Amino acid sequence: MIFRDRAEAGRSLAWRLEKYANRQDSVVLAVPRGGVPVAFEVAEALRAPLGVFLLRKLGVPGHEEFAFGAIASGGVRVLDPHILRTLSIAPSEVEAIVSEAEQEVKRREVMYRHGERPLSVAGKIAILVDDGAATGASLLAGIWALRQLRPRKIVVAVPVAPAPAAEQLAYEVDEMVCVATPEPFGAVGWFYDDFSQVEDEQVIELLARNRRTEPATAA
């Protein structure tokens, strides 16, 4: 299956999540930046508030699409020791990559939220959305971080993922929604006609559009 773009992928996810529509306890959380256009379509269809949940994939030097781990807001860090051993990535190199990623998470928090508090997820259904999951490492970090915020239910929703990653994530959450699990997988971008980079300005615009259209009762 190939999606035309992230918006089409989001609409494909949205109808699979329609049981969460028009509820005051549903919150959609996007993984910036690629997950935001997908999550925007989900949030609009569900008439739910949209927020960002800041994660940062830790890419193998020279092969950044291939993750050896991830970090998330709140100091959560997930590293894959098998990949680190296999590729002989030095601890000093790991720490340098992690430090840079942490700085980027902080930068985006300031830019995207404009001083506003993050959406409250305590006691709610938190729907965590990304544009795909190659290894699941980034989303796993997000799941662990989300648990600390005490949502009533965690739902992970992605348009595409390899079956092993989808199965691993399913064990960690209350519900896993994935449109397609193609094999061979390779990279998330293989399954989009348009997988162009999402810029910060687009993220800010989509968050603002959701705030204008989302009913006040669901905030």
Image (cartoon, rainbow, N blue to C red):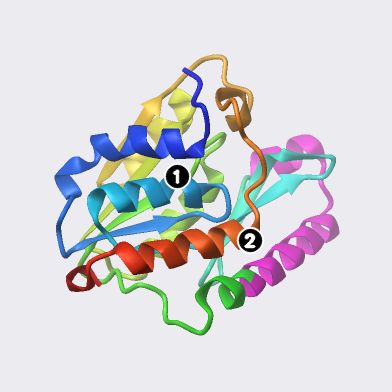
- Identify whether 117 is placed above or below 161: below
Q: Which residue is mark 2?
A: 200
Q: Position of residue 20 (x, y in %)?
A: 18, 49
Q: Position of residue 90 (x, y in %)?
A: 84, 51
> Which residue is drawn at the image coordinates 55% and 24% (left, top)?
191
Is 109 displayed left or right of 157 in the figure? right
> Which residue is drawn at the image coordinates 56% and 34% (left, top)?
134
Say what amino acid the circle numbered 1 marks: Val
Q: Residues within 10 Å of mark 1 (few under 14, many from 20)?
A: many
The range drawn in magenta is: 81-107
**Number of numbered discs on residues:** 2
Residue 169 figure quarter: top left
Say what amino acid the circle numbered 2 marks: Asp
Residue 216 figure quarter: bottom left
> Which residue is drawn at the image coordinates 43% and 22% (left, top)?
181
> Residue at the bottom extreme?
115
Is residue 54 in view?
no
Q: Residues within 10 Å of mark 2 (few under 14, many from 20)?
A: few
- Answer whether residue 84 is magenta in the image: yes
| Front residue of 92 and 191 | 191
Q: Which residue is mark 1?
A: 38
Q: How far apart are labels 1 and 2 at the CA level?
A: 15 Å
